[in-house]
Amino acid sequence: MKRKAFLFMLTAATMMALSSCKNDKPRQAEGPGNDDMEMADKSLEDEEDGQADALPERGDFTFKTRIIMSEPDEEDDQVVERIVVLIKPRGGKTITTETQGVQPLDTINWQGFGRIHEDDINFDGYPDLMVCEGPVNTYGNFTYTAWLWNQEEHQFKLAEGFNKICDPELHPKEKTITGGFRMDDHEYDEVWEWIDGKITKTKSDLVVYSEMNEEEDEE
C-alpha cells in the first residue's frame, strides 16, 4: 500500500514538471536590447558619414594633364590649343580645370607643354602644383599656371598672376622667385615675392645686349 502511494506521488510530480516546461516560453539569449542595437547602428552611420566627410590631405592628390592639339594646317603642322589639368583626391571626385593660357607655338621645336611640377612655390611648407604652359616666344620664356595648396581648406586654389613669371626659379631661403623675359636684344630680370597672399613683382632690371656690345667694342 505504501509502495503504491509513493508511485502515485512520483507520477503526479513528473507530470506537473512536464506541464510547467510546456508552458514556459523560450528564454532569449543575453545581449543588447533593441534600444542598444539602434544606438549601435546610429554610431556606425555616424562613423561612415565621418569618413565620407573627411577632408583630403595634401598627399592624397594625384595629377594628370592632357594636351589638346589644333587641327593640322595645310603644311600638316599643329599647335597646342589647350592644356587640361586633372586634380584627383584619393577616393574623391576628379577636378577638371585648365591652364590659364598657352601660346600658339608648334611642338616640334619646343617640349615641356603640360609638364607637372610639385614645388613649394609660396614657401609655406606644403608642395603646390605647377603646370607648364610652354614658351611665350621663340626665345623660350616658359610660363606656368600654378595652384597653391590651402592647408586650412584642404584644397588647391589658383595662384592668380603666377603665369606672368617667365622661367621661374625658386629661392626658399630668401622666399623670392626670380624670372627672366627676353625679347630681341632686351632682357628683363625680375624678382617676385608673395605679399598678402598674392604674387607681386618687387624688382625689374633691363639688360640691352646691343648696348653691352657697343661698350665692349669701345673698350
Image: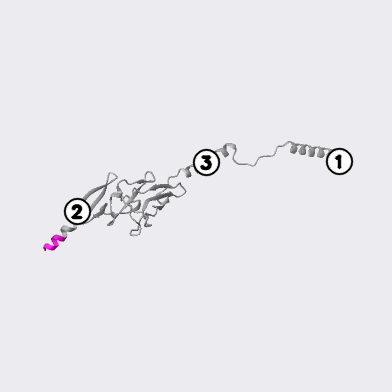
Q: Is residue 110 above or below residue 15?
A: below
Horizontal and vertical percent for residue 207? 19, 55
**To which residue does mark 1 refer?**
3
> In this orientation, which residue lies closer to the viewer: 160 or 32?
160
In this picture, residue 9 sits left or right of residue 165:
right
Q: Secondary structure at mark 3?
A: helix
For marks 2 and 3, give the CA distance. 64 Å
- Magenta stretch holds residue 215: yes
**Residue bearing the label numbered 2:** 206
* Residue linked to disc 3: 45
Q: Nearer the viewer, mark 3 or mark 1?
A: 3
Residue mark closest to the camera, 1 vs 2:
2
The alpha-carbon separation of the residues under discs 3 and 1 comes to: 69 Å
Please identify the quarter of the rendering in which residue 218 is found: bottom left
Specify whether residue 171 is in view. no
Check whether the beta carbons of the residues at disc 1 and disc 2 lie within 8 A of each other.
no
Colour mapping used in the image: one colour
What's the residue type where badge 1 is placed?
Arg
Q: Which is the main secondary structure of the residues drawn in magenta? A: helix
**Mark 2, secondary structure of its residue:** strand
10 Å crowding of disc 3: few (<14), some (14-19), many (20+) = few
Quarter holding the C terminus is bottom left
Residue 116 appears in which quarter of the rendering?
bottom left
Q: Residue furthest right?
A: 1
Residue span colored magenta = 213-219
Residue 175 inside the magenta-drawn segment: no
**Circle nearer the viewer, 2 or 3:** 2
Of 177 and 26, nearer the camera is: 177
Secondary structure of the residue carrying numbered label 1? helix
Name the spot of residue 27 as percent of width and height, x first: 67, 39
